[in-house]
């Protein structure tokens, strides 16, 4: 039998093995030396994380809103996918102006989500399954209904006044003319005292004053409350905003302009160091920074282990490919995506670690942004993106629904959106006629975060099996075609491809820790990279286009065997691989 025939035979058997999702036989087909654990590493580098947007995951009590018991009921689903840790969007008491990112009580659970005992049960059930919970720490700001703010607003000289940032206006106008991240001024007048308070986000989210020692101490106590319950991870929301450059108008401009990247004030790092010392030290937890539009060189200051700040960061360079601003899209090419991913790998590879994700609760669906969500290419491109997600030197964060290929939803008009941010932009840009309504809507449909917030699609039944009541938000029209129950037993489903890839990643130290090398940064169709750790080496080839591509293998690379691929296409030789549209393959080399 020729080399090619041998490979054809081998490929066919491996593809079938993987597509049947029988990981034990996959492992058996790879030699055990391939998958031996060779690196000692903290758990959070090797874990597969799964982000849950609570409101839309699973409703256990029929009120139309997802809840904690709904998550507990689905832990076996997550465990069987291979998930080790869950990141929850905020679960705290909140008037819910910004999806819980407006906390009114840090020590309680949002009523619609359940109770403290439901939270305890969730942790206990996760522990039974050897899973960990990461929560979102939203302490850049509170809700305007938080008792601290209610007290703070009452007079100029109460204990809580200085918990927030209050300034006099300038001749009946706000202290500066700058805009908040959610549109409108950054300052809101409070009639009771005639002063303005500062808010980075909506006016219902006043910023805490981190210069105040009492604020810090109160926040430390609130975080410890959850850590003592067994929480194993903390995501610090909007961390770069903890220090407000509110005194210099020029600095403000630079800081807020949508296209200019933010510079992190060194005081932020001092705060984080203190948090590390006073709150995290001695606990085996994962800590992460959420940082938008901060140059990634600066982000690595948070994650450099020598600095004793945080473990890793959520960096948005890749997600920002194809975006002019938060709401406006722009054409992009694969070269841009590779360059963003490569840059982050280089930076955090040197100094720390990062999370890998191509979407989250603040972004459009990954398949609609980076793949092709039309029925013809949906499944294969979802699997291609899964391959990309799970072969990076970073901790993968799967966003709920990606594992079944959920897509962007349909939004006929501005009223069909729920998002406070988008509505703020509409008021600022469309109501003032700076931007044409149709142009705005065209972009919002592509970029808006509501795309990722529609109810989870569990089944083709009523409300996609998400709720027996009326869902708080419209279910995506495609739920009959895209849902868990039609995929779980289908060996060729997106779900089972994720499951296989997760198992492969977990058993391959090189795919987790190995060096990343982009083989062909200028190729506009194929993403080709290697991951290598000592003798364990892989080539990942992803055709991110709708064309057939004959890809030439560099002379110094010898393909030994195929580990997994998303299409049954065994056509390769020593010198080239014929890639079908959206084909993704991982080879042992
Ligand atoms: C973060 C959250 C986002 C929220 C904002 C304000 O960026 O991810 O959802 O709106 O902070 O808290």
Image (spheres, rainbow, N blue to C red):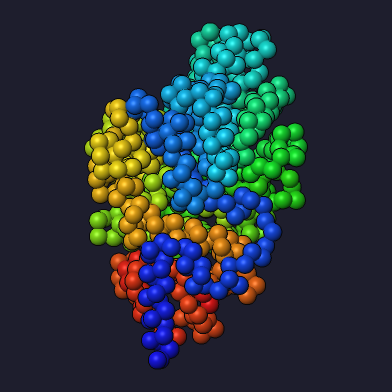
For residue 458, say whether it is visible. Answer: yes
Figure check: 307 above or below 556: above
Question: Residue at position x 61%, y 21% from top?
Answer: 164
Question: Residue at position x 43%, y 45% from top?
Answer: 77
- Which of the two residues, 530 or 468, is positioned nearer the viewer here? 468
Where does residue 390 sit, x and y in percent of width and height? 49, 58
- Relative to 253, is 432 on the left or the right? left
Figure check: 486 above or below 267: below
Where does residue 42 sit, x and y in percent of width and height? 67, 52
Where does residue 514 sit, x and y in percent of width and height? 61, 66
Question: Residue at position x 59%, y 23% from top?
Answer: 107
* Residue 254, image quadrant: top right
- Which of the two residues, 66 or 357, is positioned nearer the viewer here? 66
Where does residue 174 sit, x and y in percent of width and height? 51, 21
- Relative to 439, is 9 on the left or the right? right
Identity of the residue furthest to the bottom in this view: 1
Q: Locate the N terminus and report the quarter of the image it occupies.
A: bottom left
- Relative to 582, is 351 on the left or the right? right
- Relative to 16, is 142 on the left or the right? right
Question: Residue at position x 30%, y 66% from top?
Answer: 546
């Amino acid at each position: 039998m020729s080399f090619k025939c041998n490979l054809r035979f081998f490929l066919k058997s491996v593809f079938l093995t993987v597509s049947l999702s029988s990981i034990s036989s996959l492992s058996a087909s790879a030699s055990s030396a391939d998958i031996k654990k060779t690196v000692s590493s903290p758990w959070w580098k090797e874990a597969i994380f799964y982000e849950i947007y609570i409101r839309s995951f699973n409703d256990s009590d029929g009120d139309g809103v997802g809840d904690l018991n709904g998550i507990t009921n689905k832990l076996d689903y997550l465990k069987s996918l291979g998930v080790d840790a869950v990141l929850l969007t905020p679960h705290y008491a909140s008037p819910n102006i910004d999806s819980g990112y407006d906390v009114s009580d840090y020590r309680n659970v949002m009523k619609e989500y359940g109770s403290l005992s439901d939270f305890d049960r969730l942790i206990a059930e996760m522990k039974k399954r050897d899973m960990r919970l990461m929560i979102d720490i939203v302490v850049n700001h509170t809700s305007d209904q938080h008792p601290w703010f209610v007290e703070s607003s009452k007079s100029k000289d109460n204990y809580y006044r200085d918990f927030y940032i209050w300034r006099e206006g300038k001749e009946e106008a706000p202290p500066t003319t700058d805009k908040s991240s959610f549109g409108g001024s950054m300052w809101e007048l409070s009639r009771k005292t005639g002063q303005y308070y500062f808010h980075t986000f909506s006016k219902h989210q006043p910023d805490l004053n981190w210069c105040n020692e009492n604020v810090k101490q109160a926040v430390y106590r609130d975080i410890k409350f959850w850590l003592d319950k067994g929480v194993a991870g903390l995501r610090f929301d909007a961390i770069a905003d903890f220090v407000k450059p509110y005194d210099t108008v020029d600095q403000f401009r630079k800081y807020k302009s949508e296209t200019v990247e933010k510079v992190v004030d060194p005081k932020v790092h001092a705060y984080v160091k203190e948090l590390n010392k006073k709150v995290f030290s001695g606990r085996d937890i994962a800590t992460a920074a959420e940082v938008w539009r901060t140059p990634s060189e600066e982000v690595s200051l948070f994650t450099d282990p020598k600095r004793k700040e945080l473990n890793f960061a959520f960096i948005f360079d890749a997600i920002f490919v194809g975006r002019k601003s938060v709401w406006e899209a722009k054409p992009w090419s694969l070269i841009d995506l590779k360059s963003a991913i490569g840059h982050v790998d280089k930076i955090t590879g040197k100094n720390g670690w990062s999370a890998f994700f191509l979407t989250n609760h603040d972004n459009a669906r990954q398949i609609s942004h980076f793949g092709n969500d039309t029925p013809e290419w949906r499944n294969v491109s979802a699997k291609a993106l899964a391959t990309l997600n799970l072969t990076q030197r970073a901790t993968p964060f799967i966003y709920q629904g990606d594992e079944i290929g959920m897509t962007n939803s349909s939004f006929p008009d501005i009223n069909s959106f729920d998002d406070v941010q988008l509505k703020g932009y509409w008021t600022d840009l469309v109501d003032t006629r700076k931007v044409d309504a149709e142009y705005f809507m065209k972009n919002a449909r592509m970029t808006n975060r509501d795309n990722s917030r529609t109810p989870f699609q569990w089944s083709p039944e009523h409300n996609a099996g998400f709720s027996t009541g009326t869902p708080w938000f419209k279910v995506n029209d495609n739920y009959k075609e895209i849902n868990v129950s039609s995929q779980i037993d289908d060996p060729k489903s997106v779900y089972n491809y994720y499951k296989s890839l997760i198992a492969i990643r977990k058993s391959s130290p090189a795919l987790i820790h190995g060096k990343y090398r982009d083989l062909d940064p200028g190729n506009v169709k194929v993403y080709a990279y290697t991951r290598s750790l000592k003798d364990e080496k892989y080539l990942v080839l992803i055709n991110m286009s709708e064309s057939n591509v004959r890809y030439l293998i560099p002379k110094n690379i010898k393909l030994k065997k195929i580990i997994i691929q998303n299409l049954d296409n065994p056509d390769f030789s020593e010198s080239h691989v014929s890639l079908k549209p959206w084909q993704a393959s991982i080879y042992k080399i």
